[in-house]
Image (cartoon, rainbow, N blue to C red):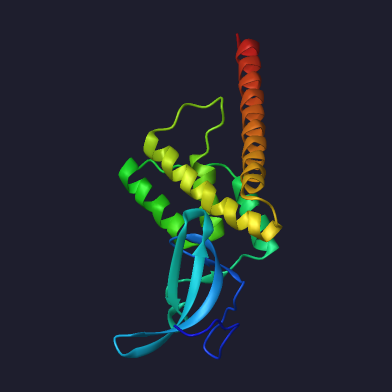
Amino acid sequence: MAAQKKTTKNSTYKTGDYVVYPAHGVGKIIRIEDQEIAGAKLELYVIDFEKDKMTLRVPTAKSDAVGMRRLSDPTAVEQALKTLKGRARVKRTMWSRRAQEYEAKINSGDLVLIAEVVRDLFRSDRQPEQSYSERQLYEAALDRMAREVAVVKELSDADGISEIEAVLEESAQKAEKIAAEKEAAKAADEEEAA
């Protein structure tokens, strides 16, 4: 292994940059190193995923091909938070197919797609319980989104989760209020008609 480098001619990122690796979420490049593998010299990003206690080595030449990207900018984070305020879109397909679609969105690395999964699988305290697999997917998406929101906004992971859950709760309360108003209007119309 070569000594630590800041950046080189082939690398897009430098030591200390936070990046999003689609299958694992937010990680930090701790060094860029050269390794000889099967007789070929490769320049690698060494990415630390501290929360998962995992280190990943990605060839600098393949970083774009595997979907590695910079963190979202604050505008993209706000767009993702806005997505949470939308109405949940739950398809009427078998759970196994929906679960695959949710998993694909989570692993896409696209913050807005991950926000859609969080929104669609969120359950407020006043809603019915989730199945174990729904809960697992929700928590995976929430964790992935919260880590990126936290790093971009310079918050702790816990504060990132709190911010997302506050948006979700507010949205759920508005939806319940609208539903209650519609129900009251419907009851008043039925009473008038009687």
Q: Judge whether residue 85 can be spotted in this image.
A: no
Q: Position of residue 62 (x, y in %)?
A: 43, 80
Q: In the rendered image of this protein, does residue 63 appear above or below residue 78? A: below
Q: Nearer the viewer, residue 151 or 171?
A: 151
Q: Nearer the viewer, residue 19 or 180?
A: 19
Q: Judge whether residue 167 can be spotted in this image.
A: yes
Residue sitting farthest toward the top: 194
Which quadrant would residue 90 be assigned to in this image? top left
Q: Quadrant of the image for the C terminus?
A: top right
Q: Residue at x 66, y 27 (%)?
A: 177
Q: Position of residue 59 (x, y in %)?
A: 43, 80
Q: Nearer the viewer, residue 126 or 38?
A: 38
Which quadrant would residue 96 be assigned to in this image? top left
Q: In the rendered image of this protein, does residue 8 appear above or below residue 103? A: below
Q: Is residue 138 left or right of residue 159?
A: left
Q: Residue at x 52, y 46 (%)?
A: 118
Number of marks in the rendered image = 0
Q: Position of residue 55 (x, y in %)?
A: 45, 65
Q: Quadrant of the image for the N terminus?
A: bottom left
Q: Is residue 100 left or right of residue 155?
A: left
